[in-house]
Amino acid sequence: EAQVTQNPRYLITVTGKKLTVTCSQNMNHEYMSWYRQDPGLGLRQIYYSMNVEVTDKGDVPEGYKVSRKEKRNFPLILESPSPNQTSLYFCASSLSISYNEQFFGPGTRLTVL
Amino acid sequence: AQKVTQAQTEISVVEKEDVTLDCVYETRDTTYYLFWYKQPPSGELVFLIRRNSFDEQNEISGRYSWNFQKSTSSFNFTITASQVVDSAVYFCALSTTGNQFYFGTGTSLTVIP
């Protein structure tokens, strides 16, 4: 089954404790992206990647890191999480840049205390 | 700057009524793509439609229809004879040659039985 998977689905952590949210897709997509969804703000793009070893900042990259060492994986790293990073996070992938629709993962609900 | 505006935050309709969700976008690019996504209460994001900037034909898919007007920079979504299963948050999104995606803040639609 074609899908985007994210782990964990739910995470409660404390300020400053490094964490990684994994994202994997099995569709051989080139483009992958991370978003955060907050009430009243919609989805905002954090980082995106056009291919292996190619990543770029979205609208809200501060406090986040990403890497794209393999085509299928695009982990999101919070080196020192803060309460303002409490949010619902979505990973997405698409066949190519811009033109194709994105397939979204199920979301990761992160709470930073 | 790229921007998507969904001015309607929440809409409630009675079942079988028609409803139109508004989307206004801003971009200086001549090539761009517009999307609609649905987020039901279960939380996943579901792709509904893509339209490119060179195709102003309206689209109809069952009870759903989309009206794209470049003259007013709008890409509105109409649900005919709404049903309870249409209750969801609907997002309009824009992508351009800059490889980023821009989402609106979403419209929460409630269909009352």
Image (cartoon, coloured by chain):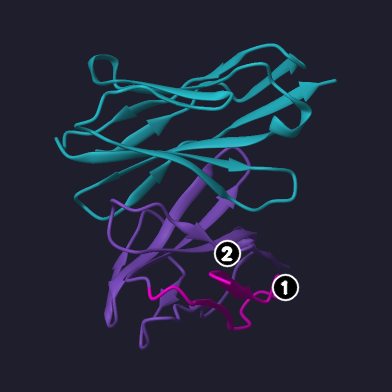
Chain colours: A purple, B cyan
Say which residue appears at 59% left-offset and 73% top-offset.
A5
Q: Which amino acid does label 2 sit on?
A: Gly
Q: How far apart are marks 1 and 2 (CA)?
A: 16 Å
Horizontal side of B29 relative to B106 (left or right) equals: left
Q: Name the residue under label 2.
A: A105
What SS does tag 2 mark?
loop
Q: Name the residue under label 1.
A: A11
Front one among B42 and B65 = B65
Q: What residue type is labelled 1?
A: Leu
Q: Does the magenta stretch include residue A3?
A: yes
Name the image quarter holding residue B17. Answer: top right
Horizontal side of B53 relative to A24 (left or right) equals: left
Do the residues indicated by labels 1 and 2 lie within the same chain of the protein? yes
Horizontal side of B66 relative to B8 (left or right) equals: left
Q: Residues within 10 Å of mark 1 (few under 14, many from 20)?
A: some
Q: Position of residue A15 (x, y in %)?
A: 66, 74
Tag 1 subunit: A
Q: Where is residue B55 in the image (x, y as percent from the top left)?
A: 24, 30
In primary-sequence order, the first of circles 1 and 2 is 1
Say which residue appears at 70% left-offset and 70% top-offset.
A9
Q: What stretch is highlighted in magenta?
A: A1-28
